[in-house]
Amino acid sequence: MNTETLSPRDLQTLLAVTRALAAPFDLSQMLREVAAAATSVLHAERASVWLCDAARPELVLEVSSDLERVRLPLGSGIVGSCAAARRTINVPDCYADPRFNPELDRSSGFRTRCMLSVPLIDHEGALVGVLQVLNRIGAPFDAGDVALAEALAAQCAVALARTRMTAALLRGELLRQELQLAATMQRAILPAALPAVPGYEMDARFMPAAQTGGDTYDLALLDDRRLLIVLADATGHGIAPALSVTQMHAMLRLALRMGADLETAFRHVNDQLCAMLPDGRFVTAFVGLLDPTTHRLRFLSGGQGPILHHRAAEARSVAHRATSFPMGAMPIAVLRPAIEIDFEPGDWLVLLSDGIYEYADARGELFGRARVEALIDAHQHGHCSALMEALLAEVERHAAGAEQEDDITAVLLRRVCGN
């Protein structure tokens, strides 16, 4: 076909598809428009669009009238050869070409006589696929057909790149909105303000490594004689861990506010998490109840540790280990007894997530427990806020610019001297 003798109808079709390609089509609709235009303008029986698989060197048949999605390695068959060579291949007699694979004809019942394969190359020079046009009516494809097909392919490649970019941006925006929602939910369940408990002072911080994190904490008065203390860490980062730890936090608060004792609440929340969380997901959690009148703390820890109790009278820290496996890992058959701590004046409870203990500098050296205990010793007579600021500053100094890879959460509680 000579482009100078292009009929008004064909010209109108070509211009229409060019205009349509500028519209915000979804990918499948855009590819169908291209195939339909190629069939019409080139007076062919059918057209197909193959796209490059970004993950492996293969072409995937995306648009075809009678075939499911077919995969071909780059370089295989005529269409694969077109992609590998990145040049148009015009075959007047397919069954005479050794590159032609008749298997697709046998699968579909269609007989391919001639074929025009044109590479789809975007504005950055990247191969995105192949436009394949089959069986020109009346005669094989000529030089004019090749010119028309290449012009259409150029428009298609640019539109395809734009459509994929738009889809990626939309996915990114959806993910951003989901992350924002998860972060809002997570912040909503954290204490708006720390409770005032006579004889005690406290501080808490949450610094997620990403927009959302898998950590949470709680310091809340359930009634006049019970202070709930929680520090929890869900496996992973992002939306799923944030929702997991938020669900755990909400269930725990509800159970305790409804009058459940520590052991009952811990067991039931654990078993609920087992039913909810996917395999391999769990939550490490310290759950404690402090009676501010008797100064006695009872706690259970599902995989969370070390739990540091600094004894002021002895000027040393005692580390307690977890009482059970992480919450949600498996149902609890036998629950170990809760650990009990008596708080003397000046005593501290220091709960820190792995994000502090395992913060590595550029050489891979971890912050570690020894640095934490040294900071407690140095600030044991000061306020919680002073120790918190010193701790975070020392972690930052240790990191020396190394990226924060895990959430940082800290809960500090101190019995005031003289009370």
Image: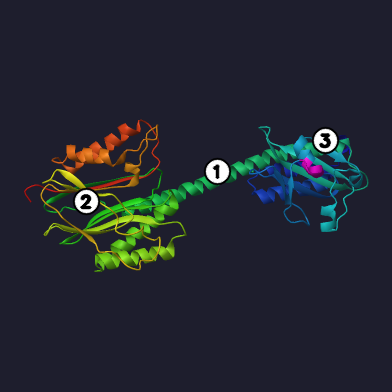
Classify 121 as above or below 238.
above
Count the labels in the image.
3
- Whole-angstrom CA distance, mark 1 to mark 3, is 33 Å
Q: Nearer the viewer, residue 365 or 141?
A: 365
Compare residues 40 and 253 and report the one nearer the observer: 253
Q: In percent of the image, x 63 and y 40: which residue is there?
A: 162
N-terminal of the pair, mark 1 or mark 3, is 3
Q: Is residue 105 visible?
A: yes
Query: With 324 as the anchor, is 143 left or right in this view?
Result: right
Residue 398, horizontal then vertical, whole percent: 32, 33
What mark, if any, has residue 147 been given in the picture?
3
- At mark 1, the secondary structure is helix
Residue range corresponding to the magenta coloring: 75-80
Name, please, the residue furthest toward the left. Answer: 418
Q: Main secondary structure of the magenta part?
A: helix
Q: Look at discs 2 and 3 and give the one toward the viewer.
A: 2
* Res. 169 mark: 1
Q: Which residue is mark 2?
A: 194
Q: Pointer 1 and pointer 3: residues touching (CB < 8 Å)?
A: no
In percent of width and height, residue 48 lies at 77, 48
